[in-house]
Amino acid sequence: MTAFDYNRALTRIKYLTLVVGLVGTVAMLLTRGRGAAAGFLAGAGLSYVNFELLSGLAYAMGGSSPKARVWAVLIALRYAIVGAAVYVIVRILGITPVAVLVGLLAVFAAVILEILYELVLHART
């Protein structure tokens, strides 16, 4: 795989995360109601932001950019940021914690879908 292939895979993962987030939100809305759908959407959004931070750090470190320190600080603070966001979502907004936690798995689902895509793509060649 070339660097171009990795960039395309990262782009697909980002798009798939958005699709999983939207489909999961609609599914939660239809099955569990507005509160669970909002929790899932919030969790998926946090998951997407976390993936962007990790991707940005990897890109900054690979390119020996001076911005690598900024990304490293953001990565170090990401658990505190995600924890604070989940606390606000659950405690203050009163949204179900399970829906938020399931939403946090949106990137995981997108990565699994990307793996299946790559397996199918390379199985034909």
Image: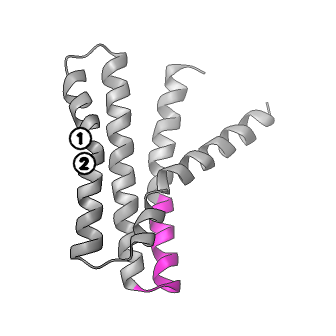
Residue for point 48% across, 84% down: 32
Q: In the picture, which quadrant includes the N terminus?
A: top right
Residue 53, labelled with which disc? Answer: none
| 65 lies above or below 31 | above
Total marks in image: 2
Q: In the picture, which quadrant includes the C terminus?
A: top right
| Percent of width and height locating residue 3 | 50, 21
Q: Residues within 10 Å of mark 1 (few under 14, many from 20)?
A: few
Left or right? Give the position of 115 relative to 34.
right
- Residue 27: say if magenta: yes
| 70 lies above or below 27 | above
| 21 lies above or below 77 | below
Q: CA distance from mark 2 to mark 1?
A: 5 Å
- Label 2 amino acid? Ala
| Percent of width and height locating residue 48 | 38, 51
Q: Which residue is mark 2?
A: 80
- Residue 105: say if magenta: no
Q: Residues within 10 Å of mark 2 (few under 14, many from 20)?
A: few
Q: Secondary structure at mark 1?
A: helix
| Percent of width and height locating residue 20 | 51, 61
Give the residues in magenta: 19-33
Can you tell which quarter of the image residue 92 is in?
bottom left
Q: Secondary structure at mark 2?
A: helix
Can residue 16 be seen at all in this image of the molecule?
Answer: yes
Q: Which residue is mark 1?
A: 77
Main secondary structure type of the part rendered in magenta:
helix
Can residue 40 be seen at all in this image of the molecule?
Answer: no
- Label 1 amino acid? Leu
